[in-house]
Image (cartoon, helix red, strand yellow):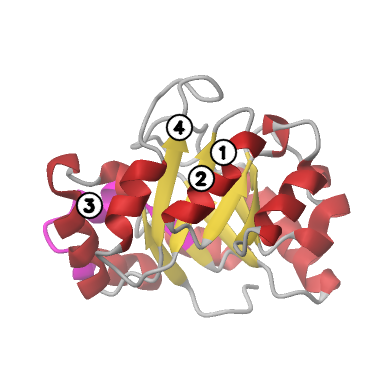
Amino acid sequence: MAQHPTLVAPSLLAADFARLGAEVAAIEAAGADWLHLDVMDGHFVPNISFGPVVIKALRKHTRMPFDVHLMIAPVDPLLAAFAEAGSDHIMFHPEAGPHPHRTLQAIKALGCRAGLVLNPGSPVVLVEPLLDMVDIVLVMSVNPGFGGQKFIASQLDKIAALRRLIDASGREIRLEVDGGVDPVTAPRCIAAGADTLVAGTAVFGAPDYRAAIDAIRRGPA
């Protein structure tokens, strides 16, 4: 089971891009814990989103930690730019570079928390040799690249396996889930061991952001 209170990290990808500053302020006022920022390059994933310039522009609008998910390859050359833009956490896919341990070292040297991201087809074994360097493990419960996809239930077993691995390590590592998270799937993720939930359309597509965030934390009534 998860060891920490559940955090909710709304994903900016689902926000109204014509009013990003106001959207960020609104979710902070609604009780969001982190802001999740999906950076896509059109190469590692089949979509393009935004880069360090947007993150830097948003930094002055909120005190929420910026939870930055890099879906870019190669990832190493751009780490400094994202750190300088105001990222608090920088997460990457181990498939996005030849030396994930070196990438984790580089992120930590930049003063950020470091995270690994596992795609639906990426095995837990990719995390094991790197666990001593990791602050966050993010499980993708959809294939990365697009918002609004259906939750892949097979990832619940992966979440449970990672929870066991993290607990056995004795380290304070956040176990995060992203993809199809809503008030119905969120309790299943929490039961499997997740303690941090990314939600895009389930928050930004709702008429009441606070109610949406609370519903994800609590599950269905």
Along the polypeptide, which appears first: circle 3 or circle 2? 2
Q: Are marks 3 and 2 in contact (CB under 8 Å)?
A: no
What residue did someone put label 3 on?
Answer: 204
Tag 4 and tag 3, C-beta contact below 8 Å = no
Q: Is residue 189 magenta?
A: no
Q: In the rendered structure, which amino acid carries the disc numbered 2?
A: Ala
Give the Cα distance between marks 4 and 2.
Answer: 15 Å
x%, y% of residue 34?
41, 66
Q: Of 184 and 206, which appears nearest the observer?
A: 206
Callout count:
4
Mark 1 element type: helix
In the drawing, does residue 133 fall left or right of residue 213?
Answer: right
Q: Residue at x 73, y 58 (%)?
A: 162
* Amino acid at circle 4: Met
Q: Are marks 1 and 2 in contact (CB under 8 Å)?
A: yes
SS at circle 4: strand
Between discs 3 and 1, the one toward the N terminus: 1
First-in-chain label (4 vs 3): 4
The foreground one among 51 and 125 is: 51
State the residue at coordinates (36%, 36%).
Answer: 50
Closer to the eye: label 4 or 1: 1
Q: Marks 3 and 2, Cα distance to the nearest angstrom? A: 27 Å
The amino acid type of the residue labelled 1 equals Leu
Q: Which mark is residue 81?
A: 2
Query: For residue 40, what is the image quadrant?
Result: top left
Q: Which residue is mark 4?
A: 40
Q: Which residues are magenta?
A: 197-211
